[in-house]
Amino acid sequence: MLNVLLVDDDIEFTDVAANIIEFLGHQVSVAGNLKEAYEWLDSQPFEHILLDFMLPDGSGLHLVDHLKKMGSTAQVTFITGHPSVKGILAEISGPKMDYLVKPLQREDIEGALSGKTKVKKVPKTSAIKRHFDCLIGESAPMQELYLMIERVAKTSANVMLMGSSGVGKEVVASAIHKASQAQGQLVTTNCGALSKELIGSELFGHEKGAFTGAIAKKDGVFERAENGTLFLDEVTEMPIDMQPNLLRVLESKKVIKVGGTKEIPVNCRVVSATNRTMESIAQDNILREDVYFRLAVFPITIPSLRERKEDIPLLAKAFLEELNTENACQYVWTEAQLERLSRFDWPGNVRELRHSVHRAFIMSDPTGNEIQLPSTFESPFSLSQKPSNNVAAGQTIENVEKELIRITLEKVDGNKTTAAQMLGISTKTLYNRLHAYGDFAE
Amino acid sequence: MSSEEIITVNKLVHDARSPLNRISMNAELIKLILENDMPKEKGIQAIDKIISACQECSNTLQILSSQHGGKQHG
């Protein structure tokens, strides 16, 4: 069951749509304008928002901005009756955003709420295999990951996903949910985005009047993921003093709503994720040991992109195929471009690769079919992790010294006095070296 | 057709889509009611809404026809 917010100013439409959504087994709240929608969002979390593009007091995009500021992970599906808006929505839609064009049918709503409309974006002719409908890669580390997903999906064990930022932890959580063939929904919440005051209500729900602003009874994520999967993203960012409450639920499989007294039995697999390392979890006192062992019954470390470089061409092709399909384009990669993408380290992992492909797609000449890669892929993250030198076994001392002088001069914009100080040699010695190498002669 | 006329036609097309959307959704609701053996009163209400939306859609098309139909064929 999903908690759905329907925002549209056509009351007759919202009446009948709410009936259908309830019939499909979801809980629905209705807002006729942005103001009412904000009030609903402040009072309870929603997993899915069906949103009219043009509302009496503003655009649906204002609500998307509001959601971003709130740190909401809700899926948004725009509903529009303006054919001209369709193109704009196709541009901005992404993994968390989709769109439908009126007149709607029941299966449109059913598809949007189950996330099936996104599948339409995958080209029908794609030769790239998507494991569990979402994971791409045929490298050995990914084969190992697929095997782990398959094995753990057959059990009800809680899984902790580890890996650096951008490796696709949410996608792996979705793969586990899919492979488990669970009857319930995959419910996602980001523990890092919730304030200390709201986290109890988000996880366990609250009774009406439990605290100021609790205008209605609300189910927590454990209840909403009944017979399904609960994905707790950034679990290590949960305040340590809230963790005993989480432990109690994990041990007893029962929740008590904030302000309530009744124990409610819950049944869901918990998949949690963190980008902290094992050492950091152990040393920094961010996760209680007992909570860790309950959550990480089956820990999975997702390989970084640099550990599976052979998958880079496949991923780049898949991302470009998706963009081509969405925008009715025919761009193709050259072998040299794929080779260049494979050589880069991608410290931001698959997310950074996708971002770079998207950027290249936007920058490419619309009259041709050749994708244009930028001269550099550097992001703030790649800069911080860029190797400081190119020293490798087998190089001569002279070459290493030459390279060191070159990068030092580059760093100080060619100022030889500063460069000499940084290198720990006199300015005269630096000039002698430069003279000897010839390359840097003025 | 001038840009002003295009805007007016687009608005009228949008106005026609809203009742079409209600017709489609109410028809889906009736299907659900019949498939699940639910009380027929709710189904009758949905049918009334479809009839009313058909009338609204027809009025919008009439405006569209009277304002722009002549020019297309003239």
Image (cartoon, grey):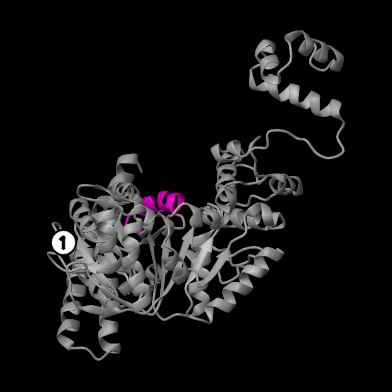
The image quadrant that residue B46 belongs to is bottom left
Q: Residue at x 60, y 70 (%)?
A: A131
Q: Residue at x 15, y 57 (%)?
A: A213
| Image position of A228 (left or right of A319) | left
Q: What amino acid type is highlighted by mark number 1? A: Ala
> Considering only vertical position in the picture, is B4 above or below A197?
above
**Segment tinted magenta in the rendering:** A77-93
Which residue matches tag 1? Answer: A214
Looking at the rendered structure, the secondary structure element under dot 1 is loop
> Considering only vertical position in the picture, is B61 above or below A395?
below
| Image position of A71 (left or right of B53) | right
| Image position of B12 (left or right of A364) | left
Crowd band around label 1 with a 10 angstrom C-alpha radius: few (<14), some (14–19), many (20+): some
Please say whether residue A138 is visible from this viewpoint. no
Q: From the viewer's side, name the closer residue of B58 and A33.
A: A33
Q: How many marks?
A: 1
Q: From the viewer's side, name the closer residue of A83 and A231.
A: A231
Q: Residue at x 32, y 51 (%)?
A: A67
Q: From the viewer's side, name the closer residue of B71 and A103.
A: A103
The C terminus of chain A sits in image quarter? top right
